[in-house]
Image (cartoon, rainbow, N blue to C red):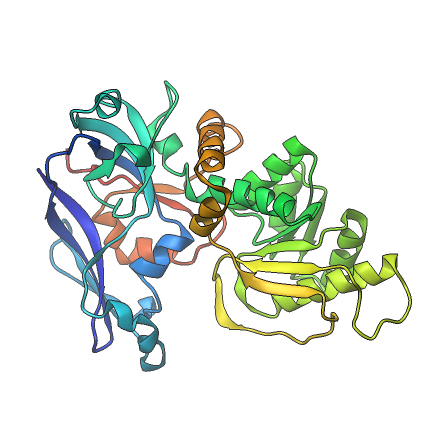
Amino acid sequence: MKSRQIRSKVTSDGQLVLSLDDAEVPPPGPDEVIIRVEASPINPSDLGLLIGPADMSRAQVSGPPENPVVTAPIAPGLLSSQSDRFDMSLPAGNEGAGVVVEAGSSDAAQALLGKTVAVIAREMYAQYRLVKVGQCLELREGTTPEQGASCFVNPLTVLGMVETMRLEGHTALVHTAAASNLGQMLQKVCNNEGIELVNVVRRPEHVELLRGIGARYVCDTSLDSFEDDLIEALTETGATLAFDATGGGPLANQLLHCMEVAAKAKDPGFNRYGSNIHKQVYIYGGLDTSPTVLHRSYGLAWGLGGWLLTPFLERVGPEAAERLRQRVADEVTTTFKSEYAKEISLAEALDLDNIAVYNKRATGEKYLINPNKDLD
């Protein structure tokens, strides 16, 4: 079996090359299945490999529409960050869903034949994907591949944030870029579980969107009153844990500073080391690629670190991870429902106009790839 797939290569002379290639799909082993992929989202985490630091405003396309090749330059100052992948053609796409069309000989594999499953397995921007049975999440009857395509990255990240809050002894959360698909899911989970959530957004329309799904605290960074609004929300909720999707710029610093002001309001008085309340910000995305800027005005009881889904799942262990996976399967059409602006084919994913939209990573403009669209 052959499968068309999107591949990304960074050359040592500073070019990004996106192409459609044919790959052999070997027969499934006893505990393996082959999925006909019918839906795979373009998440911000996918764009790191797919496009990386390339300047897509200078991209060019060659070849016929059904088999395009996209090239774009990478600035010399950014090229060194890609050295580990120089001249390697890498398949893209972290997650997706489809129908099992071939299965290995084991009972577990045979039980999935003809079933709709979701999977996080990388290389998902492909017509067909060979995966282990244990990587598959069987979707409830009636759930479509489109509904199940985003079963892993966003929903499990949301549940991971809530579990991290509990594991580390916090009682409320802050989330930035909060009007995203992930942010809306997080608000719904917090609504259901009675968790106070402070949402940080960038536009007034995002405030209204989140208020419409039950958000009580929404702070808009575009307003002059942003820090005052954030301090008020932090004082009311007692939130001391934030998950930041932006990464760069001053936002992490603002979060820590405002947490400290709120903490001092509850425990006034002089302390040369700041408040004793630990304040934590985890960066889990990179919507802002500029340096993270800190001006330490919040004492010494604070932390700034990175947070990734896979290490979190390893931390909680397989039993807890499976419990979270099954919750996602149960609520994939409700709490964890994803919305897409457009469904595109593999070739359309390499169209420069489409790239210009989905590479912005803007709220409400998430794209879904159907690798078998136009190829039936």
Q: Is residue 203 visible?
A: no
How many numbered dots are placed on residues in this image?
Answer: 0
Compared with residue 53, is residue 170 higher up or lower down, i.e. above or below? above
Report which quarter residue 152 is drawn in.
top left
- The percent position of residue 149, horizontal first and vertical second, equals 36, 36
Compared with residue 278, is residue 161 higher up or lower down, i.e. above or below? above
Q: Is residue 250 visible?
A: yes
Q: Residue at x 31, y 76 (%)?
A: 79
Is 47 left, or right, of 23 in this rendering? Answer: right
Is 344 left, or right, of 242 in this rendering? Answer: left
Residue sitting farthest toward the right: 269
Report which quarter residue 215 is drawn in.
top right
- The percent position of residue 292, horizontal first and vertical second, equals 55, 71
Quarter of the picture holding the C terminus: top left
- The percent position of residue 37, horizontal first and vertical second, equals 24, 36
Quarter of the picture holding the N terminus: top left
- The percent position of residue 108, horizontal first and vertical second, equals 26, 24
Q: Residue at x 36, y 57 (%)?
A: 47
Is 374 left, or right, of 219 in this rendering? Answer: left
Compared with residue 279, is residue 340 higher up or lower down, i.e. above or below? above
Q: Residue at x 77, y 58 (%)?
A: 231
Residue sitting farthest toward the bottom: 76
Q: Residue at x 11, y 59 (%)?
A: 63
User: Looking at this view, is 216 or 191 the one in front?
Assistant: 191
